[in-house]
């Protein structure tokens, strides 16, 4: 409409939408321009589509929730990313390594995901099927200052509290059934929820930050600094392909994001 | 000993000690100088003794956990202090009002504590025995950006989540039996534990910040900016007076800190 100021007709855009609008299996969307960015010029629609949800989540987790400064060099802080080979983990590992001075430690549990996390730039890769404190010791670390727990937080909580330095920070995005947060008290730890639909759902004053960060991600993709989290292309958007895609997601074996395209 | 560099023999000091050392009913203490400050010149030992535990807790909660900047003026952020008339609340309310640009909203539930919180500098005082959202509306506010929940966090949690703006911060110091933190996700809220013994217990690298902040508090007391949290003097340190003091604490009716002095 005529109130749009950030884009002109024909601009190629990418975005992750809002939980208050019809979902992404539709053919046409109406979306608030403040949560839309210019699409990377060097990616196809399919490859660009794999990016917004993971990139917004990872960006907000790292820079808004954990408030890590965007600064190059080698700093004193360290980030343990549990589930670094997944969709959010794949872009978070790159952002942490390329845009901050954090020491980045990712976890994976299969040979192919371990080498994937290495390629994304992690300084160290741990096996999350083994005890974390021993895995940390193996790579010469005693503690980390920050944790991004992207999956199975409930199962890992005791080990994450042990791995964190006093006064450290734990960010999470999953949906644990229960978490005993009293375990965080002795070390004065903090817990940070990241939910990428918060800004659009509540129309927060800083909602336009999603526009800004998507533009920034597109620039970083076009400059070759970041790579997309595209995994597999599953064909056109129809009931059969949606079922196939959901089945793969539910198997827990998907790597990166699954993309469907066209009707 | 000869390793002490921050003090000289005869200096009057104040501190809150460490959980790894014998407690405060003893006649003599050995304490790490990094958690000791110069006592305010304008206070008696009794009045100074009421201060360190509450002041360290309030200071760390405000400036380390919630990371509120020390800046005068009127900012866009607001802090709701639940239990503002208590020991920690009494000094936290003053610090927030005197050293930051926060709008400060304290809660109390009796006429004498309400006027006490007003005197401490709160912009508004709410009655925490009534629904918080209505109390906030009564003083012209819809949301707050920060909450310090100093007591009965479990009981107030739903109301605190409702009162917080999206992306807000909740700090706590008490010991709730259970907290359903999944309630924090929708608004991307964070939860911050403050436990003043963390630094001394783990001998963190920044342990000397307790020395620095106690010195700063002493200066602010001597300058008349802050007042102590002294409540009642209960006489010399003996079994009978300790029993009396503990009975008053357990009654939940104590205002400020109870002090005992001498043997």
Image (cartoon, coloured by chain):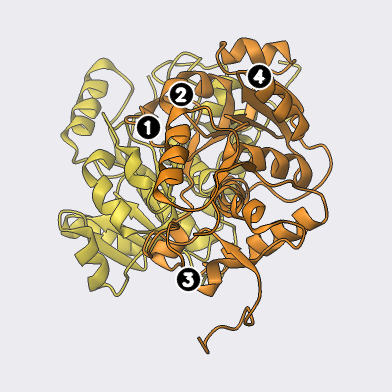
Chain colours: A yellow, B orange
Q: How crowded is mark 3: few (under 14 residues within 10 Å), some or many (20 or more)?
A: some
Q: In this view, does A115 lie to the left or right of B136?
A: left
- Distance from disc 3 to disc 2, alpha carbons, whole Å, reads 37 Å
Name the N-terminal-most of marks 3 and 4: 3
- Distance from disc 1 to disc 3, alpha carbons, whole Å, reads 30 Å
Q: Which dot marks residue A114?
A: none
Q: In this view, does B165 lie above or below A210?
A: above
User: Circle 1 is placed at which residue position?
Assistant: B176
Whole-percent x, y for residue B236 in the image: 52, 52
Count of picture labels: 4
- Distance from disc 4 to disc 1, alpha carbons, whole Å, reads 22 Å
User: Circle 3 is placed at which residue position?
Assistant: B31
Q: In this view, does A234 lie above or below A239?
A: below
Q: Which dot marks residue B157?
A: 2
Secondary structure of the residue carrying numbered label 3? loop
Q: In this view, does B83 lie above or below A167?
A: above
Name the N-terminal-most of marks 1 and 2: 2
Name the N-terminal-most of marks 4 and 2: 4
Do residues under tags 1 and 2 come within 8 Å of each other at their CB atoms? yes
Q: Is residue A85 above or below residue A152?
A: below
- Do pointers 3 and 4 mark residues of a single chain? yes
């Amino acid at each position: 409409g005529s109130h749009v100021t950030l884009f002109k007709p024909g601009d190629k855009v990418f975005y992750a939408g809002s939980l208050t609008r019809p979902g992404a299996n539709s053919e046409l969307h109406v979306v608030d321009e403040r949560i839309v960015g210019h699409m990377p010029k060097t990616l196809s629609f399919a490859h660009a589509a794999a990016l917004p949800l993971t990139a917004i989540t990872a960006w907000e987790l790292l820079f808004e929730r954990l408030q890590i400064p965007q600064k190059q060099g080698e700093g004193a802080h360290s980030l343990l990313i549990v589930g670094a080979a997944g969709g959010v983990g794949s872009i978070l590992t790159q952002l942490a390594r390329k845009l901050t001075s954090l020491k980045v430690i990712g976890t994976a549990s299969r040979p192919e995901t371990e080498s994937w996390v290495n390629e994304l730039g992690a300084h160290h890769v741990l096996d999350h099927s083994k005890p974390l404190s021993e895995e940390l010791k193996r790579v010469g670390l005693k503690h980390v200052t920050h944790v991004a727990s992207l999956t199975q937080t409930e199962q890992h909580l005791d080990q994450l509290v042990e791995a964190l330095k006093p006064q450290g920070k734990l960010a999470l995005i999953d949906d644990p059934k229960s978490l005993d947060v009293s375990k965080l008290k002795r070390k004065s730890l903090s817990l940070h929820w990241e939910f990428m639909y918060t800004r659009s759902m509540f129309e927060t004053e800083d909602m336009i930050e999603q526009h800004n960060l998507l533009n920034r991600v597109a620039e970083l993709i076009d400059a070759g600094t970041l790579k997309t989290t595209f995994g597999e292309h599953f064909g056109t958007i129809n009931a059969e392909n949606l079922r196939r895609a959901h089945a793969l997601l539910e198997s827990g074996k998907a790597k990166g994001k699954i993309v469907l395209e066209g009707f």
